[in-house]
Amino acid sequence: MTAGQQQMRSAVLARAWQRIPGVEVLSAGDGGPLTRTVKKIIDPLVVRTAARPRLGRPLLDPAAAAEVTELLLADSARLRATAAWFTHLKRQRRALRITAGNVQDVCFPLAYELATGFGMPDAAAPERAAATLREWHGEDGTAGVDQLSGYLADPRTAADLTAELRRRWHSTPHSPVAADFVALLDAVVNGFPDDAWQALADTPAGHAFGLALRQPGGTALLARAVGEVSGLPAPDLGLQRGERTAVPPLNQRDETGGELLERSIERRVRATLRRAGPGAIADLVDEELSRTAAGFGLGSPVLATCFVLGVVLSPALRPLDGTDSGDLPEFARRLNAQISREGYVLYARRALAGSTPLTAHPDPEILRELREFAKRFLARLWVRLHGFDVSGEVPAAAADIRDLLTGVVRSTSLDLRTKVRRALVASLPRLEAAS
């Protein structure tokens, strides 16, 4: 291998994994890690790709490959203990007649948690594994989501929590939106230099803009920032229904729409349960009340600032307009080019949305999906940042933030690719007849 040559990440993981003895139950037939081992243990818990997105790329440069290998081998003792705990968990799961959830999805993270807390299993392992499963699934087999629903269904509890949310919402101190925030945002999106990102990260810009949306004129304030940075008018970004962010409802059934900042506490905690695993429901709800009261519903100021970056970049993400997108910031232009050159976008633009589309009846749903790319990007970005907030992980370096935003654009594009392909296949007879 020549210096600087990139390597397939899967091959890097497989080579390192094969150097760890005693992990056969977590391994595939070829000796590498199972796909679910990578998804449930290696990426989120060992390599921590959420905070180090450069280590999660399909192709790794030599430095990143060496870092991934080092992280995996440094955790080899705990991974061996994880494999041993998984065997106990699987056995106890059968004994308790638990069938809810995929055994690997549930037990891989639990096994790693037990390995972290207790090392290799000892004589008490069967009892400890059973207790862990009961805690996760509930003593009577009720899932955490059902426990949450039951907790919120109590009228007195619901009234107390609603009052507490309103108290925190209205008592959160507002930071003024400083005049230099826009200049700092502009400096970051034009090349993403480390010093510009650090200067922005040291400000309360994220929370300031988020909390401003709850005040008269806040929407216009954010729209002006978007226009000054991107040079484009701010489209409907799906943040809130009205001019001011409404206090989110407690229960999901009371949601009036899918707007990001007005999602119910129940829906947010459901996501917390998926990410954080077992925990006292009352504590998880209380933590989410505090998080919801913060700007953009994100407790970490740095994560809120990451979201503002996404907001000012999002209007530039217009795949149907092509790559000639005018005087955009450098990073925004690169992101838009990334999605505009996708084969499915090029074909959709020519076949469905051009000045002379190939069909007289373009698919309105697909056109709407592509025209609302910015809204879908922000929804996915917010979910990713909320996950960081729940886990307590905060990407720090400019390169990590850049990779995070690029990765969210990519995943949004891949999600739309499937929908567009399906619509184009359905439209194929009409397109062939028109061509």
Image (spheres, helix red, strand yellow):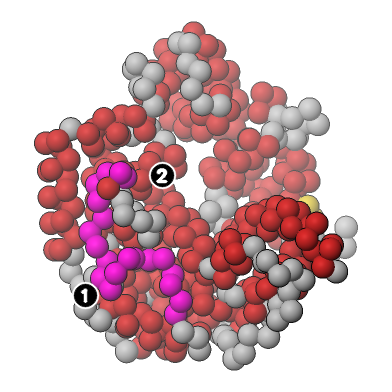
Q: Determine the secondary structure under disc 1.
A: loop
Name the amino acid, label 1.
Gln
366 shown above or below 244: above
Reading the image, the residue beneath label 2 is: 271
Q: Residue 203 location in percent, x, y? A: 34, 76
254 shown above or below 152: below
Q: Determine the secondary structure under disc 2.
A: helix
Q: For residue 224, what is the image quadrant?
A: bottom left
Label 1 vs label 2: CA separation? 28 Å
Reading the image, the residue beneath label 1 is: 215
Q: Residue 155 location in percent, x, y? A: 14, 35
User: Alpha-carbon neighbours of circle 2 within 10 Å: few (<14), some, or many (≥20)?
Assistant: some
Quadrant (top left, top right, bottom left, bottom right) of the C terminus:
bottom right
Q: Residue at x 88, y 58 (%)?
A: 1
Range of the magenta residues? Answer: 234-253
Whether residue 410 can be seen here = no
Q: Residue furthest right?
A: 1
Q: Residue at x 46, y 84 (%)?
A: 233
159 shown above or below 200: above
